[in-house]
Image (spheres, grey):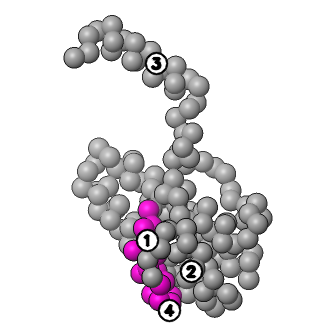
Amino acid sequence: MLNREDLDSLRADFEAFKEKNNLCEDGSCVSGESIDLKDYPNYTDALYNIIMPPSKSGVYISRWDLKEIAEDAGESMAIHPRRRMFELLMKYAIDRERMKLVLDAIEKHILYKVEIYEELRDEFLDSANLFQEKIDKAHKTIDIFPDILDEYF
């Protein structure tokens, strides 16, 4: 059990941690940064780094989710590691029409997860701000889809 000195020490450590602005090192905080698609060597890397990390997109996309997204876009896919499945999905998206199908399927999937977050936000009011951050990130991710089409196709 923590005594008073241990608790004070823990509090001091936490305050020092906050002062160093280390609270967002994992990328989980919302930033005002815009995403420059030209920073990536190809659209597969750009999209993977924008869509797949939950810290950026607000949602977790599993291997099974990728399989469903591929099916919604008109492609059949076996289960592989996430990165490999994403690369295979991008190999399918060889032209603007197919990429639009893929992005539409990803958007549909993200919006489904957003609905879940909204239900949780409304049900658990004490955690509403946490879910709202994820919802905002998800919408921000969807908002760049037209830019992806314009930039790469």
Dot 3 falls on a residue whose secondary structure is helix
User: Are there few (<14), some (14-19), or many (20+) residues within 10 Å of tag 4?
Assistant: some
Work out whether mark 2 precedes mark 3 in sequence or the reverse, and give the earlier one. 3
Where does label 3 land, which residue? 13
What residue is shown with label 4? 74
Q: Viewer-nearest of labels 3 and 1?
A: 1
Name the kind of residue labelled 3 in the image: Asp
Q: Quadrant of residue 41?
A: bottom right
Q: Residues within 10 Å of mark 1 (few under 14, many from 20)?
A: some
In the rendered image of this protein, does residue 24 appear above or below residue 86?
A: above
Q: Main secondary structure of the magenta part?
A: helix
- Magenta range: 60-77
The quadrant of the image that shows the C terminus is bottom right
Residue at horizontal 45%, vertical 22%? 14
What kind of element bears circle 4? loop
Residue 72 placement: quadrant: bottom left
Relative to residue 148, is residue 104 drawn left or right?
Answer: left
Q: CA distance from mark 1 to mark 2?
A: 11 Å
Looking at the rendered structure, the kind of residue marked 1 is Arg
